[in-house]
Amino acid sequence: MTDRNDELFERARAVIPGGVNSPVRAYGSVGGTPRFLVSARGPIVTDAAGTDYVDLVASWGPALLGHAHPEVVEAVQAAASRGLSFGAPTGAEVELADLIASRVVVGDARPIERVRLVSTGTEATMTAIRLARGVTGRDLLVKFAGHYHGHSDGLLAAAGSGVATLALPGSAGVPAPIAAQTMVLPYNDLDAVRAAFETHGGDIAAVIVEAAAANMGVVAPLPGFNAALAEIAHAHGALLIVDEVLTGFRVHPAGFWGLQASQGEVYTPDILTYGKVVGGGMPLAALAGRADVMEHLAPTGPVYQAGTLSGNPLSVAAGLTTLRLATPEVYERVDAAASVVASALSDALTAAGVVHTVPRAGSLFGVAFSADAPRDYAGALGQESWRYPPFFHAMLDAGVSLPPSVFEAWFLTAAHDDDALGHIVEALPAAARAAAQA
Ligand code: PMP
């Protein structure tokens, strides 16, 4: 039986490569027809056939408050009525930059003195790397296998997210000399980091790391890992770029850095990158850090970066309103909702006899079909990932929209009330049985 989603997918494939504007949306690893969405409100999304789903994708993270929070929508509408884009500075941008800098503080630790707004996480990390190279005068970049930092050329070596989902080695179209500037190391392996710096220390501009890995499934950093990265990088005159595009303002008011700092692991990133929640569902991202590093950006410094739509007034309105509404209580709600779903997920899989773990990093969690929580990309790839497609489809049939890949985190929002959570919990046992039979 075909429905409106099938019709749209067929039309889409005739005009859009693969029918989607971002690869993981195509259901490539789970099969079937992607749902074409027409609206979203609170914890619910509605597809083109009129079917509602309790949503655990949250636009891949931004919808911390739930979809279409009325105050955020109102702020965007008000901004739109004043003009869609100026290409000139605005007061609201200054407010957002101030708010970001003043939120990312724990005790005396305050890593942000300057903020530059861009439009996507990809731009934020790409610029952060160029900045690190400009500041240090070095070319090499260290990244970790399975970490995703967007799709700029040098970052697609052994990346997570869609690259992991599609089992691509990296990407065609990236010149070998550019790929050769990126050293890919196993995650959570400080010996590998020390060895890389011993051999190439004088040439390494920066280490880039997801604050907590969440694009190969959720793989938290081992205790002390991020702090040791800062220490090793700094000892060799390199910078540490902590990518909080996914975790920033989602797991804690001050991001994963803030969560760790508040638990006693305090370290100093030189550059932090943000996206997703900071734009409240609109295209907005940021890089931020120490003044003496950030002032290397044009127009004060020689590292060029620009954007026609950077600091777009609608995006800034959405981001400002979202961050203002993201009070400590919001994080408590999201944490509590994550705990409800994570434990129901584990209970259901245990009852069905499915070997699994539910790895967690703050309120972020996912499922891994392996006995031990993966510590790195090899561990994540080694799981029984074929159990995910039937599990995913059983949940979808029961009206729960999960990320269409086992390598993605599940996102709760502050709008997931008892009804929404109850719906998810009820759907899990049958999905777990489907996973068991795979
Ligand atoms: N960094 C991380 C950690 C991400 O999760 C993502 C996107 N999922 C990006 C960067 C890229 O952001 P964008 O998709 O906005 O370019």
Image (tube, grey):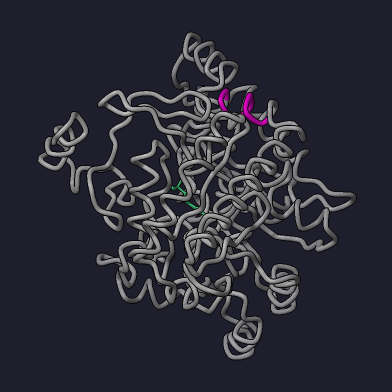
Q: Quick check: 10 left or right of 416?
A: left
Percent of width and height locating residue 140: 51, 75
SS majority, magenta: helix
Q: Quadrant of the N terminus?
A: top left
| The quarter of the displayed image where residue 329 is located | top right
Q: Residue at x 50, y 13 (%)?
A: 77
Query: Tag count in the figure?
Result: 0
| The quarter of the displayed image where residue 389 is located | bottom left
Name the residue furthest right: 108
Stretch of the chain drawn in magenta = 317-323
Compared with 413, 133 (above or below) is below
Percent of width and height locating residue 207: 59, 70
Q: Quick check: 330 left or right of 149?
A: right
Q: Quick check: 197 left or right of 161?
A: right
Residue 158 can be seen, yes or no: yes
Task: Examine the structure image and report whether residue 408 is included in the region drawn in magenta.
Answer: no
Seen from the viewer's position, the closer of residues 314 and 356 is 356
Q: Residue at x 30, y 68 (%)?
A: 168
Q: Residue at x 77, y 35 (%)?
A: 328
Compared with 421, 348 (above or below) is below
Task: Examine the structure image and report whether residue 321 is included in the region drawn in magenta.
Answer: yes
Residue 129 can be seen, yes or no: no
Percent of width and height locating residue 164: 38, 65
Percent of width and height locating residue 193: 62, 81
| The quarter of the displayed image where residue 159 is located | bottom left
Seen from the viewer's position, the closer of residues 152 and 77 is 77
Q: Quadrant of the C terminus?
A: bottom left
Compared with 363, 138 (above or below) is below
Compared with 169, 62 (above or below) is above
